[in-house]
Image: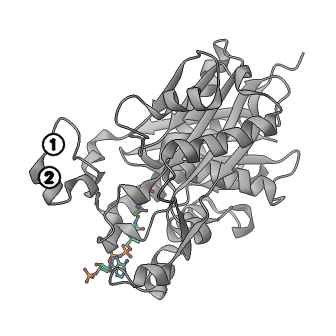
Amino acid sequence: MDDRIGLMGFGSYAPARVMTNDDWSKLVDTDDAWIVARTGIRERRFAADDESTLDLAAAAAEKALADAGIGASDIDEIIVATDTPEVYTPDTAAFLQDRLGAGEVPAFDLGGSGCAGFVLALDIARTRVMAGAQRILVVGVELISRLMDWTDRNTCVLFGDAAGAVVVGRGAVEAELLGATSGTDGSRAGILTLETGGTRRPFSLEEAERGGQHDIVMNGREVFREAVKRMSAATEQVLQKIGRMKEEVALIIPHQANLRIIDAVRSRLGVDEDKVFVNLDRFGNTGSASVPLALAQAREEGRIRAGDLVLLTAFGAGFHWSAAALQF
Ligand code: ACO
């Protein structure tokens, strides 16, 4: 009997509307050369006015279910990783359960773990399958364009909207989930945060007047340093956990925040450029959607073959980090 736990279906969705660096230069004091040199991003996708987080999540989820050859009634759990939920309460997973027509199964969001959310959700899904769940839908989705400050050039040019999804289950899997590792350093929580709307700083007229609801606080350099350190270490840790060598890795799919971060992780690990998947030039930083979007695209573009060992590594607000190893 095939008892492996892993990924059975993949899906992704990026909205049609393209926002180029030149488009940004008409709105804030920036230019294509600065953005490309500092981040590697050339364009990103933004949701249409009538699209919501749920629409993005459902589009990716439907593709993942179809790819796995199953229907919504075959899922027995739903996890949605997002920091930009459909509404404040209840969570996006509840809306998604209804939209997909899934059974009355546990459905919950993993919120607040920033760009590490999806890989952390995979780590959790794996243990839930070990505990008896058969098929879990895991979604990473972000609609950041609607919540960020469109006048803050320090942050607005970095992000994009998208969703990615996988089905995690036991049996005939396409990629075995060999292991995962996750961690948190909450002492750095203030370095990348959006405070307004929580109990510390509730919504108020004063907050609204100063645009507090869009107030992403970010120390870019600190985030940069920590992202490199933590994503490299998590990659090494997961390899150690599964007893495999760096040389055996066919492809690393890192969180797509910044090309310089990805290059620094690659050089720390001593890995060749062709072994690292990059799509942030086309999509920017799509938060929790970044890794599943890249994973689905790498597979579609033929960058992953049967027999490949593929590593996912992500880092986000918290700080949180997570890495996972997949054997295709
Ligand atoms: N266009 C033009 N100039 C800009 C822009 C812009 N869009 N944004 C900032 N600048 C200016 C700054 O104001 C600063 O000007 P000053 O020197 O007059 O004060 C100058 O550029 C240099 O700023 P630095 O902060 O030194 O630039 P740096 O090389 O560190 O790059 C960046 C900034 C891209 C934010 C980088 O630090 C970074 O990518 N950090 C990681 C942040 C990140 O990825 N956050 C996403 C969420 S978290 C995550 O996904 C892991």
Any part of residue 28 in sight:
yes
Q: Identity of the amino acid at label 1?
A: Arg
For the point 61% across and 27% down, the residue is: 125
Q: Residues within 10 Å of mark 1 (few under 14, many from 20)?
A: few
Q: Earlier in the sequence, mark 1 or mark 2?
A: 1
Local SS, label 1? loop
Number of marks present in the image shown: 2
Any part of residue 239 in sight:
no
The mark found on residue 201 in the picture is 1
- Which marked residue is nearer to the observer: mark 1 or mark 2? 2
Is 242 on the left or on the right of 263, as rendered? right
Q: What's the CA distance linking mark 1 and mark 2? A: 9 Å
For the point 44% across and 67% down, the residue is: 158
Local SS, label 2? helix
Image x and y of residue 94, in percent: 50, 27
Q: In which quarter of the view is residue 34 placed? A: bottom left
Is 273 on the left or on the right of 200, as rendered? right
Whether pointer 1 and pointer 2 mark residues with C-beta atoms closer than 8 Å, the reply is: yes
Q: Which residue is mark 2?
A: 207
Q: Identity of the amino acid at label 2?
A: Glu
